[in-house]
Image: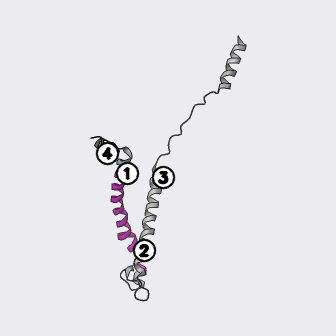
Amino acid sequence: MKIISEFKSFALKGNVVDLAIGVIIGAAFSKIISSCVDDILTPLLLSPVLEAAHLSSINQLTLFGTVKYGSFLSAVINFVLVAWMLFWLVKVINKSKKPAAEVIVPNTPTAEDLLTEIRDLLKKQ
């Protein structure tokens, strides 16, 4: 029974639960970003280039008829666009966050300050 209670305390720690939630939200968000890149940005950016090359897909680009560098270019473009989208998303989120309130720490007197104050009070008597 001890092993079950240890596992329960491990599995329900705040960090583990937060991480699990982050992974689940990240997976769902990944689909949104991928759709934006695959269905909107890539066709908008590549359509004119592909039409000029008389191709229907970037994957059709080959070198010497065997080296399919179009697939590699597609993966690179996809990575750059996803990174760009995430950069702007993080930038917007960070901009929308309110700055943390500045904590003002009261100036506590040092031992010398207290002794000086006591000396001054004794002098007045």
Residue 111 x/y as whole percent: 65, 25
Q: Quadrant of the N terminus?
A: top left
Residue 75 shown left or right of residue 118 in the figure: left
Depth check, mark 4 against mark 1: the one in front is 4
Q: Residue at x 46, y 61 (%)?
A: 87
Where does label 4 land, which residue? Answer: 7
Label 3 to label 2: alpha-carbon separation: 28 Å
Q: In the rendered structure, which amino acid carries the disc numbered 4?
A: Phe
Q: Residue at x 39, y 47 (%)?
A: 15
Depth check, mark 4 against mark 2: the one in front is 4
- First of labels 3, 4 by sequence position: 4
Where does label 1 land, which residue? Answer: 19
- First of labels 4, 1 by sequence position: 4
The span picked out in magenta is 20-49
Residue 79 x/y as whole percent: 43, 68
Depth check, mark 1 against mark 2: the one in front is 1
For mark 1, give the secondary structure: helix
Q: Residue at x 42, y 74 (%)?
A: 45
Where does label 2 land, which residue? Answer: 45
